[in-house]
Structure formats: structure tokens, C-alpha cells
Image (spheres, grey):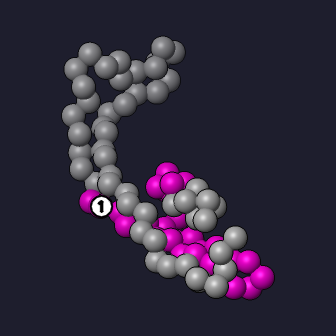
């Protein structure tokens, strides 16, 4: 189901969302959950400008977090 694939890839970038269910006519067609790893501090690469041109924004710290969408299931009776 293309929409479930779209939701899985989008869920990776949604910070506040950790689980999505897809319903049609009050029936759950698919459930997806995002598993998030522990944030890790990263060094700011040498040579990277950490201040905006106008000096209004400055990068002081960078962290990386692993996010992996997990497919929890699909109702096999409802393929489109």
C-alpha cells in the first residue's frame, strides 16, 4: 500500500509523532511506530560556519538521533 510507505518515510522526520494508524471506514488498515535511539553529541565539522550571515543564529551543539519506522501490521482483507 503506497500510502503506508509514505507514512513510514514521513514518520522518520516527524519529531512529535511516534505512532500512526491508517483507518478506512472505521477499520485499521495499517499501524506504524517509530523507534528512536539515544541522542549522540557530534562535533561541529571544522570549517563549517556556525553563525548566520546577520549573526542572529549560532550553532552551539549538534546531536544525531537514529529513528527507525516499524511496521506493526496491516489488515490483509483490505488491499487496494
**Magenta span:** 9-38
36 part of magenta stretch: yes
Dot 1: element: loop
Q: Please report the residue visible at 53 percent of the width from the left and 64 percent of the height from the top.
A: 17
The answer to whether residue 67 is above or below residue 77 is above
Q: Please report the residue visible at 31 percent of the width from the left and 20 percent of the height from the top.
A: 48
Residue 4 seen by the camera: yes
The answer to whether residue 50 is above or below residue 71 is above
Q: Is residue 22 left or right of residue 71?
A: right
User: Residue 38 sits in which quadrant?
Assistant: bottom left
Q: Please report the residue visible at 55 percent of the width from the left and 79 percent of the height from the top.
A: 74
Q: Of residues 54 and 7, which is closer to you in this image? A: 7
Residue 14 seen by the camera: no
Q: Where does the image place residue 72, in percent across and percent down from the top left?
A: 46, 77
Q: Residues within 10 Å of mark 1 (few under 14, many from 20)?
A: few
User: Residue 45 sits in which quadrant?
Assistant: top left
60 part of magenta stretch: no
Q: Which quadrant: the C terminus?
A: bottom right
Q: Please report the residue visible at 28 percent of the width from the left and 54 percent of the height from the top.
A: 39
User: Residue 10 sits in which quadrant?
Assistant: bottom right
Which residue bears the numbered disc 1?
37
Q: Of residues 1 and 72, which is closer to you in this image? A: 1
Amino acid at each position: 500500500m503506497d500510502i503506508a510507505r509514505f507514512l513510514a518515510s514521513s514518520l522518520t522526520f516527524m519529531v512529535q509523532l511516534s505512532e500512526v494508524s491508517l483507518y478506512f471506514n472505521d477499520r485499521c488498515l495499517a499501524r506504524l511506530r517509530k523507534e528512536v535511539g539515544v541522542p549522540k553529541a557530534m562535533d561541529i565539522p571544522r570549517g563549517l560556519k556556525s553563525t548566520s550571515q546577520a549573526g542572529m543564529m549560532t550553532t552551539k551543539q549538534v546531536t544525531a538521533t537514529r529513528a527507525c519506522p516499524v511496521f506493526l501490521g496491516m489488515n490483509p482483507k483490505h488491499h487496494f
